[in-house]
Image (cartoon, rainbow, N blue to C red):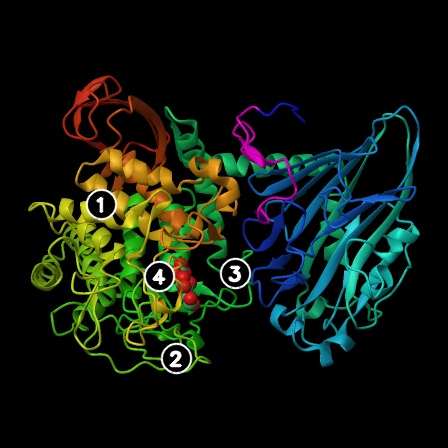
């Protein structure tokens, strides 16, 4: 372990770019700083003190280990180890024992977390990861005696089983305290609650050596009146060999051993999930069929096997990240683009908004709009999975283009309980599908037959789904010819038809008034921005008539925005159910909103007549501050039933004047469209975690990933972040910085090169893999401009324009770009 960090560090840690890790050097971070293990199905969340939990595919219905939310102290419960020497007990991740460590590092890497610690000259190196294609978490734990004398040590593992359904597990004690069942067989501890009845799955926790004891009953291990910090068994120095009968089953291995002077020993623990087909549930004599568990444990029973699996994981990530790599003048920009932003995009793609330290994993499924937007950040890395996701999402759409707001990942079916009629939802399908086609050139996806409302009898081509999305807006226009907002648009909390007075109902699901008046200027902008792509697609496919029809609607929408969507210095946000403007000079609070400024300008409205610049100057003056761009200003100070949830939040938080980070890249992109590279990049750096690392204590959440919200300028705690990890912020910032600021943008016919950078940026190099070819792009900016490609050379030959063609797969091309 390097004693001297390679980079400048904050009090809590530093980026180690070479290993693609964030290194935490103080376990008492301002909030638990977590990481995600797993890539496709089996997942763990793991904090910098080894807290967190594990699930298979669905954080609600297939929860392997238990977690208690909003606990005291924070982040209690996880997969823990205790090391004991004499009467001294400590944990390699500091928690839960919390004995002071002589050395502590948590290295969160791509798909693994590593904990390096030492106490009493016993050095511990613990690495946790989920091997590729494996339904298990592997923990490799090494202990070294760094003294000249032998040491007698004990090691205890601990995890607490969840009784599968995470919500029921936290509430239904009258049943659950009687159902728990375990089995211990050598070093394998099995959790088989409800396996006797309808479940075809069980979990196990094993270690690749003989054990000297175990515990499976929580009370026996901890003692009824103890927390995780001082289990009775550990204090006593001996496992109880307890077998749980109901109550709360756990799994704890007990190991006792001697470490010679300078000696290192290694153990491999495997926490696995097994599904057995109906005919193979039981052995001939009626016992649990353990074959698959034993095979899984055997797959990782040696140091070499684990080292190989770790190397494969590293290759997997390198291969993904290689699709877009920059070498630029600012290491913070490089590490965001090359490593952390792409990593977060993959995590949001995998988890949607289901499981984080802010999302409980028992609430939300996959959001229709969220999942579409998440694709923007990953389609260049995992086009096949993006394709599958698009088809899954489209299958939850209704024939009239509307959509379930969410669907469940296990069943892939729409969730009726969450409501529908968020009138922005349908349009995001156009954006994601177009992003996929531009990246891959796979127009065939449009011919895929996709059901409506998951009903095979109602299947039509994906292209027909896009048309339905487009027409959903056309068929739902309000009095000004602007789109009706429905339950809400992207801003979930702008509930203009809700008028709720009952504190027991949720704004998101309660019955709305039939709203034929409230309109959204943001959806109007989206409609044109994504609709133009739809038109281009129609033309590309020779559907001239459809293209012309769609164009007429876009033209009408542009006229409606001109007439009714411009407020003098910025774009209006909406009309409420009484037809009164929102986000206008006419309002006392909520005079200006961020969303329509971003979307109308992305739609091209006001680019040729100066309104775009005027609106962006208003954003700069009224919404932007040191920690980002707030969503609206001034924030509401009282509840407005006619606006809904937005006015429920105290000023400066969430959708009421918070920096809702997801929306900031819209302004960055808009700034690039008017050629203001300095401002676009300035806004980028206000949010990008690597640039905010200096504010780590104030920011609170992880300094390596974006948060959904940073408290706004009117908040009591400006600059403080919440809801880290699972947010559309990741994909949109990635999209903005790679495609609009650095300006390498996929189109139907090739890669468009159109950077818009700070004038002082002298240049940068990008390696981009696109449709199988590698583009080595070198941009030079000797004249100090922000935008404008003066000349391009491909493999040494000058070419006209700034569109790079699609090259043959596996070919390699050098591209020089001169700005000026
Ligand atoms: C959350 C939701 C997203 C919504 C946003 C703004 O991020 O997941 O769907 O658009 O809030 O309200
Ligand atoms: C979104 C919003 C949040 C709102 C929630 C309702 O996530 O960000 O403010 O309360 O939706 O489900």
Of badges 4 and 1, nearer the viewer stands 4
Q: Which residues are magenta?
A: 6-35
Residue 70 percent location from the top left of the image:
60, 62
Q: Is residue 30 magenta?
A: yes
**Numbered label attached to residue 510:** 2
Of badges 2 and 4, nearer the viewer stands 4
Instruction: Indicate the quadrant where residue 198 lies.
Output: bottom right
Report whether residue 104 is seen.
Answer: yes
| The C terminus sits in image quarter | top left
Query: Disc 3 to disc 1, how far (Cα)?
Result: 31 Å
Q: Which residue is mark 1?
A: 670
Q: Is residue 547 left or right of residue 264?
A: left
Q: Secondary structure at mark 4?
A: loop
Label whose residue precedes the other's in the sequence (3 or 4): 3
Query: Disc 2 to disc 4, how far (Cα)?
Result: 20 Å
Of badges 3 and 4, nearer the viewer stands 4
Q: Nearer the viewer, residue 58 or 441?
A: 58
**Numbered label attached to residue 656:** 4
Q: Main secondary structure of the magenta part?
A: loop
Query: Disc 1 to disc 2, how far (Cα)?
Result: 35 Å
**Numbered label attached to residue 359:** 3
| The N terminus sits in image quarter | top right
Q: Is residue 566 above or below residue 678?
A: below
Q: Are marks 4 and 1 in contact (CB under 8 Å)?
A: no
Q: Secondary structure at mark 3?
A: loop
Query: Disc 3 to disc 2, how far (Cα)?
Result: 21 Å
Q: Is mark 3 within 8 Å of ligand 2?
A: no
Query: Disc 3 to disc 4, how far (Cα)?
Result: 20 Å
């Amino acid at each position: 372990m390097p004693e001297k960090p390679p980079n400048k560090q904050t009090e809590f840690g530093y980026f180690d770019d070479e290993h693609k890790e964030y290194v935490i050097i103080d376990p008492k971070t301002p909030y638990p700083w977590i990481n995600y293990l797993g890539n496709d199905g089996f997942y763990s969340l793991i904090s910098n003190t080894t807290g967190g939990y594990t699930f298979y595919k669905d954080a609600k219905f297939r929860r392997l280990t238990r977690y208690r939310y909003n606990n005291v102290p924070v982040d209690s419960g996880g997969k823990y180890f205790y090391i004991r020497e004499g009467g001294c007990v400590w944990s390699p991740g500091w928690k839960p024992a919390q004995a002071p460590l002589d050395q502590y590092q948590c290295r969160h890497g791509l798909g693994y977390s590593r904990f390096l610690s030492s106490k009493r000259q016993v050095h511990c190196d613990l690495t946790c990861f989920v091997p590729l294609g494996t339904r298990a978490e592997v923990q490799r734990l090494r202990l070294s005696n760094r003294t000249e004398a032998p040491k007698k040590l004990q090691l205890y593992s601990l995890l607490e089983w969840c009784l599968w359904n995470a919500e029921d597990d936290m509430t239904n004690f009258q049943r659950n305290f009687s159902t728990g069942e375990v089995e211990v067989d050598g070093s394998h501890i099995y959790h088989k609650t409800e396996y006797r009845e309808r479940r075809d799955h069980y979990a196990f926790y094993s270690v690749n050596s003989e054990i000297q004891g175990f515990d499976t009953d929580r009370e026996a291990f901890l003692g009824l009146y103890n927390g995780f910090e001082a289990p009775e068994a550990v204090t006593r120095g001996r496992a109880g060999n307890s077998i749980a009968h109901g109550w709360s089953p756990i799994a704890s291995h007990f190991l006792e051993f001697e470490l010679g002077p300078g000696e290192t020993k290694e153990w491999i623990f495997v926490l696995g999930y097994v599904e057995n087909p109906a005919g193979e549930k039981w052995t001939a004599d009626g016992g649990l069929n353990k074959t698959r568990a034993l095979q899984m444990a055997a797959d990782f029973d040696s140091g070499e096997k684990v080292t190989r699996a770790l190397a494969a994981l590293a290759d997997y990530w390198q291969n993904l990240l290689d699709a877009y790599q920059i070498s630029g003048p600012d290491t913070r920009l490089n590490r965001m683009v090359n490593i952390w932003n792409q990593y977060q995009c993959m995590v949001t793609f995998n988890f949607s908004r289901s499981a984080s330290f802010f999302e409980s994993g028992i609430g939300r499924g996959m959001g229709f709009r969220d999942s579409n937007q998440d694709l923007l950040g990953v389609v260049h890395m995992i086009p096949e999975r993006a394709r599958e996701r698009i088809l899954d999402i489209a299958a939850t759409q209704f024939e009239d283009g509307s959509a379930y707001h969410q669907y469940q990942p296990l069943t892939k079916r729409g969730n009726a309980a969450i409501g529908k009629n968020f009138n922005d939802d349908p349009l995001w399908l156009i954006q994601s599908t177009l992003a996929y086609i531009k990246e891959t050139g796979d127009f065939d996806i449009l011919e895929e037959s996709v059901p409506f409302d998951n009903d095979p009898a109602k299947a039509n081509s994906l292209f027909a789904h896009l048309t339905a999305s487009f027409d959903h807006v056309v068929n739902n226009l309000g009095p000004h010819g602007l789109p009706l907002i429905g339950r809400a648009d992207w801003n979930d909390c702008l509930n203009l038809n809700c008028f709720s007075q009952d504190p027991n109902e949720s704004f998101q699901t309660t019955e709305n008034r039939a709203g034929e008046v409230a309109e959204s200027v943001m959806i109007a902008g989206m409609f044109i921005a994504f609709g133009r792509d739809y038109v281009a697609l129609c033309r590309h496919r020779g559907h001239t008539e459809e293209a012309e029809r769609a164009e007429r609607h876009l033209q009408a929408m542009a006229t409606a925005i001109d007439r009714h969507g411009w407020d003098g210095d910025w774009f209006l946000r909406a009309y409420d159910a009484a037809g009164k403007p929102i986000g206008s000079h006419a309002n006392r609070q909520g005079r200006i909103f961020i969303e329509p400024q971003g979307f109308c300008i992305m739609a091209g409205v006001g680019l040729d007549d100066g309104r775009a610049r005027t609106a962006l100057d208003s954003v700069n003056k009224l919404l932007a501050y040191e920690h980002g761009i707030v969503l609206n200003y001034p924030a509401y100070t009282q509840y407005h039933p006619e606006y809904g949830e937005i006015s429920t939040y105290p000023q400066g938080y969430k959708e009421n004047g918070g920096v809702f980070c997801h929306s900031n890249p819209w302004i960055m992109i808009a700034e690039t469209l008017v050629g203001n590279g300095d401002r676009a990049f300035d806004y980028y750096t206000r949010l990008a975690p690597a640039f905010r690392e200096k504010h780590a204590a104030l920011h609170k959440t992880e300094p390596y990933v974006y948060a959904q919200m940073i408290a706004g300028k009117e908040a009591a705690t400006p600059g403080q972040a919440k809801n880290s990890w699972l947010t559309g912020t990741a994909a949109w910032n990635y999209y903005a910085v790679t495609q609009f600021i650095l300006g390498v943008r996929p189109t139907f016919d090739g890669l468009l090169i159109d950077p818009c950078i700070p004038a002082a940026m002298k240049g940068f190099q990008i390696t981009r893999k696109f449709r199988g070819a590698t583009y080595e792009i070198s941009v030079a900016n000797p004249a100090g401009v922000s935008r404008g490609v003066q000349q391009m050379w491909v493999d040494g030959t000058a070419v006209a324009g700034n569109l790079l063609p699609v090259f043959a797969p596996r070919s390699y091309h050098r591209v020089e770009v001169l700005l000026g």
